[in-house]
Image (tube, helix red, strand yellow):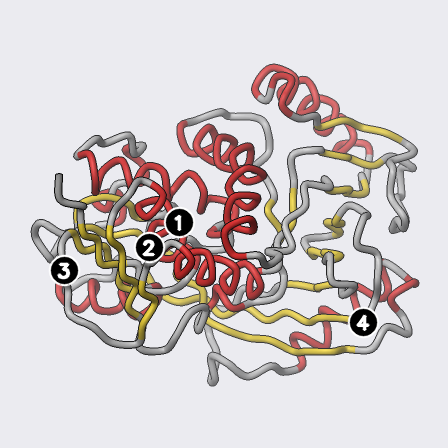
Amino acid sequence: MARAEVTVLGAGIFGLSIAWACAQRGAKVQVIDPAGPGAGASGGIVGALAPHVPENWNDKKAFQLDSLLMAGTFWAEVEEASGLSSGYGRLGRVQPVLDDKALSLAHARSEGAAQLWGAHAMWHVTRDPTAAFLPTSPTGFFIHDTLSARVHPRKACTCLVAALRARGAGVVLDGNLAGHVVHATGVSGLEALSGALGKTVGNGVKGQGALLGFCAPETPQLFVNGLHIVPHADGTTAIGSTSEREFDDATSTDDQLDALVARARQALPQLETAPVLERWAALRPRSRSRAPMLGAHPVHKGQFIANGGFKIGFGMAPKVAEVMADLVLEDRDTIPNGFKPEASL
């Protein structure tokens, strides 16, 4: 039997992950991206894989839970094939509880997690979470979930490219379309789709982040007043990120990033003397529905789309790869209705 052929347009996290899932099932795969792998938001530095809160359960949250639970095996297989590190580690996340109202809500969510996450992970309220460093908590309590994980986005993309090439897949700047075609083209793809349909179905939201020279590779990430502080396996710590709808330059950093770094250092005095190793900015693809757009392409008939992984792309990638491979290779649709392209049209 002839091998199925798949062409993936876009070498961000969705495109590379879908290509990997298809290659794992025996397909002949090529990934085409004129800017190269991880050239957009997927080439970032933060990499917080964090769950939605365990309440008001729906198909989207169940999908994300499945993906976060799949991530350990997914990245282990990619690392084995590539011989490289993705920086993945499921070390959990710690958040200070700011007031009595938040404390009551945290306890309620702990009960929700016990029901919805089952034995897979915990969301618990504690005075003494296991962490190498902690911010101040006004109530003395912290939320510690064991579902959150981290990955180094840039290293993860490099790892996927090497794994694909080890499986004989092409990752190239240019090429001819062959077989099934998947559009995973990020912000440019959303802009093109909006132009073709004559209405906005998504856009790019700018994010800025910083990488500090602070080593704490085995401690949980922190979430403090909307700010992610993510210790990486390579001895750096990432700070991020902004969400900017209005901007002059999509890839430049400015005083908004300075403010993030200052907030991180105020929340965690251990970071006060840590040098800033890198400043990063890029556009992240956000669909109108805020959910990923997965399924049949609305314009290119017979082709597919996987786009809009705004802020959750790396956490969603293992499950996105699975359901897109189901659809592309087996014509089996297991995609939640809220993720279908029509939800953003």
Q: Residues within 10 Å of mark 2 (few under 14, many from 20)?
A: many
Q: Dots 3 and 2: beta carbons under 8 Å? A: no
**Amino acid on which disc 2 is placed:** Asn
The Cα–Cα distance between marks 3 and 1, rounded to whole angstroms, is 31 Å
Sequence-first disc among 3 and 1: 3
- From the image, tell me which residue sits under label 3: 178
Which residue is drawn at the image coordinates 74% and 49% (left, top)? 221
Binning the other alpha carbons within 10 Å of mark 3 as few (below 14), some (14 to 19) or many (20 upward) gives some
User: 10 Å neighbourhood of mark 1: few (<14), some, or many (≥20)?
Assistant: some
Dot 3 or dot 2: first in sequence order is 3
Q: Earlier in the sequence, mark 2 or mark 4?
A: 4
* Residue at 47% over, 84% down: 249
Whichever of labels 3 and 4 marks the residue nearer the N terminus, that label is 3
Q: Is residue 118 above or below residue 137?
A: above
Front of the two marks 3 and 2: 3
User: Residue 166 at x, y = what percent?
Assistant: 42, 58
Helix, strand or loop at mark 4: loop
Q: Which mark is residue 307?
A: 2
Q: Mark 2–mark 4 contact, CB under 8 Å?
A: no
What residue type is disc 3 on?
Ala
Residue ranking furthest to the left: 301
Give, as a three-letter code, the residue at label 4.
Gly
> Where does label 1 land, which residue?
290
Foreground tag (1 vs 2)? 2
Q: Position of residue 100 (x, y in %)?
A: 82, 32
Real-space Cα separation, disc 1 to disc 2, in angstroms: 11 Å
Quarter assignment of residue 108: top right
Frontmost of labels 3 and 1 is 3
- Residue 76 marker: none
Q: Which residue is mark 4?
A: 213
**53 on left or right of 94:** left
